[in-house]
């Protein structure tokens, strides 16, 4: 956790990164979100049909309270809701 900082309750790496954070375990590299869900929820990080979804809409966040296990359809609906939320917010902003 020494490389972690808290931004708006999200746990993110201190160093700016271009890609989502990863963890190396047993000779393999995993997304940090999948490892966190393994520890907290028992998600097998090798299952590709399960997704680490975010309630915070921050793909760099690995706070276990911001993550939940989903599938492709859950992820697509979540992404669509996020995009619609952005459109609604931008429509209210003056130009």
Image: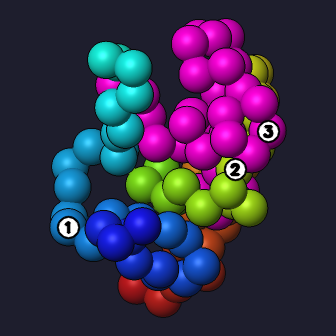
Q: Is residue 79 visible?
A: no
Which is nearer the eye, 76 or 34? Answer: 34
Q: Secondary structure at mark 3?
A: helix
Image spot of residue 65 (x, y percent): 74, 61
* Quadrant (top left/top right/bottom left/bottom right) for the N terminus: bottom left
Task: Point out residue 45 in the picture as x, y percentages from the top left corner.
Answer: 58, 22
Whichever of labels 2 and 3 marks the residue nearer the N terminus, that label is: 3
Q: Quadrant of residue 53?
A: top right
Q: Residue at x 33, y 32 (%)?
A: 24
Relative to 30, is 59 above or below? below
Sequence-first disc among 1 and 2? 1
As measured in the structure, the alpha-carbon distance from the residue carrying label 3 to the one carrying label 1 is: 27 Å
What mark, if any, has residue 15 been given in the picture?
A: 1
Locate residue 92: give its quadrant: bottom right
Toward the viewer: 43 or 75?
43
Write the start and end of the magenta stretch as one range. 29-57
Q: Residues within 10 Å of mark 2 (few under 14, many from 20)?
A: many
User: Where is 6 relative to 74, above or below?
Assistant: below
- The circle on residue 67 is 2
Spatial CA distance of label 1 from label 2 is 21 Å
Q: Which mark is residue 41?
A: 3
Closer to us: mark 3 or mark 1?
3
Residue 55 visible (yes or no): yes
Please tell me whether mark 1 sits on a helix, a strand or a loop: loop
Left or right, residue 70 beside residue 95: right
Mark 2 lies on a secondary structure that is strand
Q: Residues within 10 Å of mark 1 (few under 14, many from 20)?
A: few
């Amino acid at each position: 956790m020494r490389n972690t900082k808290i931004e708006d309750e999200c746990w993110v790496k201190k160093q700016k990164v271009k890609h989502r954070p990863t963890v190396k375990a047993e000779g393999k590299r995993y997304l940090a979100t999948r490892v966190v869900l393994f520890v907290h929820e028992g998600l097998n990080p090798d299952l590709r049909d399960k997704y680490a979804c975010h309630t915070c809409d921050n793909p760099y966040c690995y706070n276990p309270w911001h993550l939940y296990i989903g599938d492709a359809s859950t992820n697509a609906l979540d992404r669509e809701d996020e995009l619609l939320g952005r459109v609604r917010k931008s429509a209210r902003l003056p130009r």
